[in-house]
Amino acid sequence: MTTATWGLFFAIYLTLLVIDLGVFSRESSVLTIAQALKRTLIWIAVALLFGVFVYFMYQNPLPGAVSSLSGSEALVQYLTGYLLEWSLSVDNIFVIAIIFTFMNIPMQFQYRVLFWGIIGAILLRGVMIMAGAVLINTFDWSFYLFGAILIFSAARMLKQDDEFDPANSVLIKLARKVYPITDQLDGNRFFTQVKGRYAATPLFVTLLFVDLADVVFAVDSIPAVFAVTQDPFIVFTSNAFAILGLRSLYFAVAGLMALFKYLKISLVFVLGFIGIKMMLHHHVVVPNLLSLAVILSFLFIGVLASVRANRRAVATRT
């Protein structure tokens, strides 16, 4: 993609962030499940609409753009990458919920932490995506490495209930050595004054935790999207739009966690499938349409199994 294409993407994306901050988040508030679901659907629609932009940019490339992908191929890769990143972010949400509980952050301040956490996540993932692209383009064996990481991550996800325990983290100890930290919240402020000195509030420490958790999950999700496409533009944009709706998705999923208890098992199979696909990259060509269908099928089965289990549980109680 040309510099102009990247510039256009960032202009669109930054505009969406401003809308999210200025329209959806003028002040901290607690979202109901219904409100969160509506906003989640809005961001999904925006991400799908950007898919149309991806199609036309690859079907009718700007002068100087070089790509072997057609518009339809780019669209399928973008949609597959977006769905993959979006579904994996669900597991990230469970960890974020643990962080908020551990840090005792009131619901009305969680929205602000999530917004700035997304900003940090975009920057950190951008660096990791560039490093991953260089690694894949330089070393053929990196496909086997990334595939092994994904298969190991699937096994770890299956074995462990919680992958991130704030109580065992050294982040707070390190942060205290760098900058003073107070134990008291000061509204929605990240920094406050204590006895005439500036200090970070627990809200800022929570922000550090959220970004750290996202980096941990990016180690799984970024190799996964590279199994779908090695095009840096599609890798980055699919990640960016999946992250964009994370705040609304958090409040939707956090309120419905008990209803989708088998969804995590679906994610295990998704990671395992993508890991195997990546390890076979040099030997077997798996069409991206097939990958998209497999991912959708695993997620559908997980949701369906959860719904049926909940219905049986309700029937048993009554």
Image (cartoon, rainbow, N blue to C red):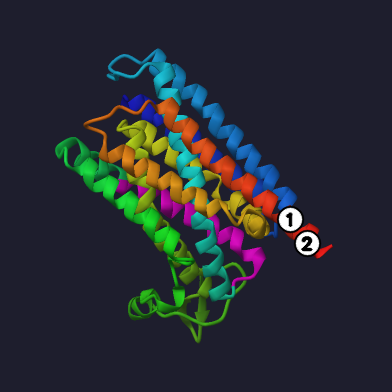
Q: Looking at the picture, which amino acid does disc 2 mark? A: Thr
Give residue 186's mark: none
Residue 27 seen anywhere in this rendered image of the structure: no
Which residue: 64% across, 38% down? 42
Which residue: 45% across, 17% down? 56
In the displayed structure image, the side of residue 90 where residue 278 appears, left or right: left
In the displayed structure image, the side of residue 94 where residue 213 appears, left or right: left
Q: Tell me where residue 116 appears, x and y as whole percent.
A: 50, 56
Q: Which residue is mark 1?
A: 312
Residue 191 seen anywhere in this rendered image of the structure: yes
What segment carries the magenta color? 105-128
Q: Quadrant of the C terminus?
A: bottom right
Residue 153 falls in which quadrant of the image?
bottom left
* Dot 2 and dot 1 residues touching (CB under 8 Å): yes
Pick the residue in front: 149 or 245. 149
In the displayed structure image, the side of residue 2 where residue 142 appears, left or right: left
Which residue: 42% across, 32% down? 291
Q: Secondary structure at mark 1?
A: helix
Which residue lies most toward the bottom here? 195
Q: Looking at the picture, which amino acid does disc 1 mark? A: Arg
Q: Tell me where residue 31 appears, x and y as whole percent.
A: 70, 56
Q: Tell me where residue 228 appears, x and y as whole percent.
A: 36, 34
Q: Quadrant of the N terminus?
A: top left
Residue 181 falls in which quadrant of the image?
bottom left
Give residue 316's mark: 2
